[in-house]
Image (cartoon, rainbow, N blue to C red):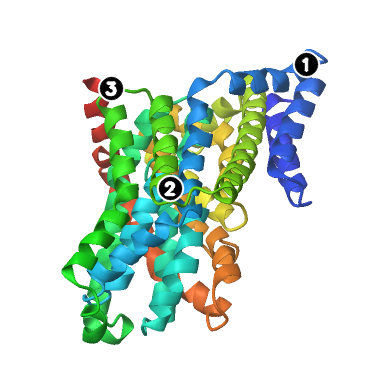
Amino acid sequence: MSYGLIAALMFSSMMVLLLTGQRVFAVIGFVGAAAALLLWGPGGAEMSFASAIKVMRWYPLLTLPLFVFMGYMLAESRIAEDLYKMFHVWTGPLRGGLAIGTIFMMVIISAINGLSVAGMAVGATIALPELLKRGYDKVMVTGVIQAGSTLGILVPPSVVLVLYGMIARQPVGHLWLAGVFPGLLMAAIFILYIVIRCWLQPNLGPPLPKEEREQYSAADKLRLLRAGLIPLFIFIAMTGLFVTGITSLVESSAVGAVAAMLAAAWQRRLTWQVLHDTTRKTLAISAMFFWIITAALCFGAVFDGLGAVKSIEYLFLGEMGLEPWQVLVMMQLTFIILGIFLDDTAMLVIVAPLFIPLAGALGFDLIWYGVLYTITCQIAYLTPPFGYNLFLMRAMAPPEIGLQDIYKSVVPFVGLMIFTLIIIGVFPEIATWLPQQVYTK
């Protein structure tokens, strides 16, 4: 049996096992370890243990639990609620202002957590009831919250980019900086869409009534501004220390975690219950990602040993005669199709052993490709019928928002994400300029 056929058998076996409903890391790790055992004997089975040791020795991976802890601490201590109230008061007088404020809030929540689910939880439980109560169109605001929450996997500190960096063997600091401008660009496109649509259809996003705006004095607005900007100050201090070279990446994540605890204590909200809930959720998320990384490294090591990437490269470029850009488009379309059925981490560990080395072999910058991958994950999060965020919204939305409303709400935002993906693809400097400037110095 040829190595190419063995690689195809491994991939198909993995897909069949995933359909049984088993955990992703268990399926990936089992297929990798079993293939190594059958191909190379008892010594080959040790590849999975070697992968585990590699994870434990990878020092930058400590950033993952620290950033997750920081995000959950700010959410559990209700500092995120203060953030939304600030945007509620300051942007409410505009047409669509509360929806615009929700996007701003999502950007900051993304910058302190790195997970899509955190932004979705805050948006659905805090922002959505306020938007509906003030007469905003339920379809539009449902799409705003779902699309805004996906910024968590692009704006640093993105946990998904940590996973990508580990599997692609690329520095996480470069990847995070590469996600800054694309993330802000996507947020700006979302805001521009809201502004234009509410200008054309004012009934979709009415401004706050005059009597409600007059309830807040200038002193009240300044007080809300101070409380709401706490997360922003934490993020600026944390990233500023890192970018200027004063602290390493891991040290910066520790600064963020400690600063979040100090902010909660300063607000007199650091209780044992908050600390318990934050720690429990952090451990659950971190353990899940560590298992997935270990399984992906085991599977990838077997694939590298079989030379599967070289076989696929020869198939596309040699036998089919495709150009590198055509292969890249095919890869991104595959990501979107997989995203209909799988979440972002499952997509990464399933196709990473194939696509990441192939992108490098085709001559593409793997830092830039990491941003393309992440944006494609964002699109997959919203793609019916099984987009991850669609089900999260269905579970959190009030009864008046049905599944049809949720599906309809994401259509324009998926289009905007595809537009952003094309812009980043045509102008890669949007992603690569900042890490080049910072790390060249």
Disc nearer the start of the sequence (3/2): 3
Instruction: Residue 245: give its label.
Output: 3
Quarter of the rendering containing residue 155: top left
Q: Amino acid at mark 2?
A: Ala
Q: Residue at x 43, y 45 (%)?
A: 265
Image quarter hosting the C terminus = top left
The image position of residue 440, as x and y in percent, is 23, 21
Please determine whether, in this image, residue 241 is positioned above or below residue 77: above
User: Is 106 on the left or on the right of 333, as rendered?
Assistant: left
Residue 416 appears anywhere in the view: no
Image quarter hosting the N terminus = top right
User: Disc 2 marks which residue?
Assistant: 264
Q: Residue at x 78, y 12 (%)?
A: 43
**Circle 1: element type:** helix
Q: Residue at x 21, y 85 (%)?
A: 210
Q: Nearer the viewer, residue 272 or 5?
A: 272
Label tally: 3
Q: Amino acid at mark 3?
A: Gly
Marks 1 and 3 sit apart, C-alpha to C-alpha, by 45 Å
- Disc 3, disc 2: CB below 8 Å? no
**Circle 2: element type:** helix
The image position of residue 2, as x and y in percent, is 72, 25
Marks 3 and 2 sit apart, C-alpha to C-alpha, by 27 Å
Q: Residues within 10 Å of mark 1 (few under 14, many from 20)?
A: few
User: Disc 1 marks which residue?
Assistant: 40
Q: Residues within 10 Å of mark 3 (few under 14, many from 20)?
A: few
Please determine whether, in this image, residue 405 is positioned above or below residue 222: below
The image position of residue 132, as x and y in percent, is 42, 80
User: Is 316 on the left or on the right of 21, as rendered?
Assistant: left
Q: Nearer the viewer, residue 195 or 28?
A: 195
Disc nearer the start of the sequence (1/3): 1
Q: Nearer the viewer, residue 90 or 291?
A: 90
